[in-house]
Amino acid sequence: MQGVTSAVFPGKGGADVSTVCYDINLDKGDPLAQSDARLLNITWAQYSSEWNSTMHAHRHAEMFFIMSGSGTFQLQRHSFPVSGRSLVIINPGVMHCEQSNQGSPMEYIVLGVENLEMAANEQGYVLTTFHRDWDAISVSLRLMLQEARSGQDGYSQVCQRMLEIILLRILRRRGLSLASEAVGMDDNRECGLVRRYIDEHFKESITLDQLAELAHINKYYLVHAFRKAYGTSPINYLISRRIQESRFLLTNSNHSLSQIARILGFSSLSYFSQSFHRTEGVSPMEYRKLHTAEARQQAGESGG
């Protein structure tokens, strides 16, 4: 537990000074302890309505922070929409390209990072949307750009430290973790089988007992092995897949919240709402209103 010390010191003329001191425990678990992630480059880009990238892959990971606008990421057999405050992490070796929406040109900052691989879905990418931490992450990204432009002594060290701060903020989010070297899809067929099944059937009713039966292993061992491989439990991974799909439905369909909950296999609207709020920091209705308002504002700006 973090140590906290409070004190009040009397000052001159009857004025007091109140202090709060927080102990910093460097021995506490470090999410980046097993990571040698190294920043290779940082790029700012804003699309014109006529230009889109072509399919390509890198030996390193890419972290796309969508600052404004909207667009689509295309993989070899999969595509998904993105908009402001979204983060897309493409693992090494994954073919991809970015396409901007003509009415709302996409602006993003992308970090090329060596020795980084996230516990991703079957297609090799991570997609998440920020609310609470976005402003802090945005400040870090702008500072990195400023340092890179300046080229002053020590700029690369500043940028590397900012990358580590950003990664720590990302890894605090539920369901996001680094890929484990100890257990992976190639080394643990059972976990890989369970994960693929969830990716393909997440809209259906799925229980831990079903998944354990599918993998032919004890359900408690399955939870342990899956968490070691992907940084989260099978059920939490299932929920994160449903929440990921719900973000798309909330912003790209007229389905009611009850309909979305039913489509995605949630047992009730309240369970869907609680799960969404726990992951995104806002309710499904607030998320829909926020992104609808952003889309209208961006459309108005592009039209003006």
Image: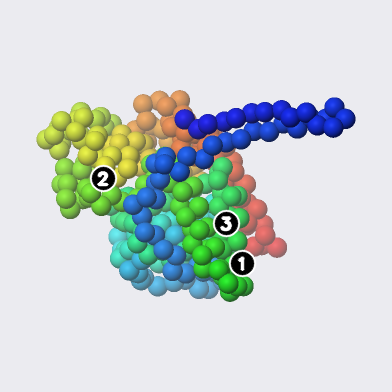
Please name the amino acid that badge 2 sits on. Answer: Ala
Determine which residue is flagged by label 2.
229
Determine which residue is flagged by label 1.
146
Q: Within 10 angstroms of label 2, few (less than 14), some, or many (20 or more) residues? A: many
Q: Which residue is at a point 59% across and 67% down the rendered structure image? A: 147
Please name the amino acid that badge 3 sits on. Answer: Ser
Q: Quadrant of residue 105?
A: bottom right
The answer to whether residue 106 is seen in the rendering is no
Q: Quadrant of residue 299?
A: bottom right
Query: Marks 2/3: CA distance?
Result: 30 Å
N-terminal of the two: label 2 or label 3? Answer: 3
Query: Marks 2/1: CA distance?
Result: 37 Å
Q: Which residue is at a point 54% across and 37% down the rendered structure image? A: 23
Q: Quadrant of residue 60?
A: bottom left
Helix, strand or loop for disc 1: helix
Q: Which residue is at a point 61% across and 55% down the rendered structure image? A: 139
Please say if the residues under marks 1 and 3 sit with CB atoms less than 8 Å apart: no
Residue farthest to the left, as pictured: 216
The answer to whether residue 218 is seen in the rendering is yes
Please name the amino acid that badge 1 sits on. Answer: Gln
Asked if residue 259 is positioned above or below residue 167 in the image, the reply reads: above
Q: Position of residue 12 (x, y in %)?
A: 85, 32
- The disc at residue 140 is 3
